[in-house]
Image (cartoon, rainbow, N blue to C red):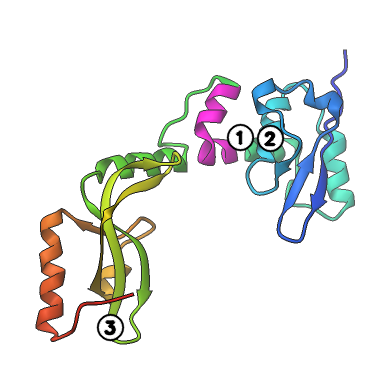
């Protein structure tokens, strides 16, 4: 028995784009993953992963090429990129959908969760701006990390929020993660910096 052809149409809006599937294919997707539309950045991967073994993607690949979309060269490119997208940004959904295990080795989100777990109880930066009043310093808002928010972001105790000044070079060394102040005791070091520079407390 031949597989049904995969179809997915794109709908543009002023702010974002979405994909829709015909009802005949939607019925092949597990109910908890069915949506009227899938947003174009990440959710597009859900129906592709769900149907990668149930549909023929040859015609869909040709339609992409006919519309001068040559990002995907082969059918395997489509399905492998969709799997990678889900593992990176929707690891729980990917595991539920495929039954495959996901780890920090192949998931950016799992890496983030592990990093946050290692920094619970420490002060992390959550907002920053180069100081126009104090050249060479960055105005950084920090707060105590108390857990994980929305599956992949630090959760902060807003009652501990404080703004400090950090030297440019030190702040630039943070890499791709939140800037780490560390233990609550280290707050005193940055408050001392304000005193040594004879600067008033930073205000919003």
Q: Which contiguous range is marked in magenta?
A: 83-97
Whichever of labels 3 and 2 marks the residue nearer the N terminus, that label is: 2
**Relative image position of residue 89 (x, y in whole percent):** 53, 41
Which one is in front, 126 or 77?
A: 126
Residue 93 on the magenta segment: yes
* Magenta stretch: dominant secondary structure: helix
Residue occupying the far front of the picture:
159
Residue sitting at x 66%, y 28%: 33
Circle 2: element type: helix
The residue singled out by tag 1 in the image is 83
Q: Quadrant of the C terminus?
A: bottom left
- The circle on residue 79 is 2
Residue 60 on the magenta segment: no
**Distance CA(mark 1)–CA(mark 3):** 43 Å
Q: Nearer the viewer, mark 1 or mark 3?
A: 3
**Marks 2 and 1 close (CB-CB < 8 Å):** yes
Circle 3: element type: loop
The residue singled out by tag 3 in the image is 136
């Amino acid at each position: 028995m031949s597989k049904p052809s995969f179809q997915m149409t794109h709908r543009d809006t002023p702010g974002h784009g979405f994909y829709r599937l015909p009802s005949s294919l939607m019925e092949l997707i597990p109910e908890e993953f069915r949506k009227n539309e899938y947003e174009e950045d990440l959710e597009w991967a859900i129906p592709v992963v769900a149907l990668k073994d149930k549909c023929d993607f040859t015609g869909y690949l040709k339609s992409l090429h006919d519309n001068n979309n040559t990002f995907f060269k082969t059918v395997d490119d489509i399905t492998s990129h969709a799997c990678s997208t889900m593992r990176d940004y929707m690891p729980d959904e990917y595991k539920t959908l495929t039954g495959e295990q996901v780890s920090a080795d192949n998931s950016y989100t799992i890496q983030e969760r592990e990093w946050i777990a290692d920094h619970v109880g420490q002060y992390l930066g959550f907002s920053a701006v180069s100081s126009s009043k104090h050249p060479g310093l960055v105005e950084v808002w920090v707060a105590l990390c108390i857990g994980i928010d929305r599956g992949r972001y630090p959760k902060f105790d807003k009652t501990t929020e404080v703004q400090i000044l950090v030297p440019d070079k030190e702040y630039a060394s943070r890499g791709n993660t939140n800037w780490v102040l560390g233990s609550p005791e280290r707050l005193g070091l940055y408050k001392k910096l304000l005193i040594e520079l004879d600067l008033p407390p930073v205000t919003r």
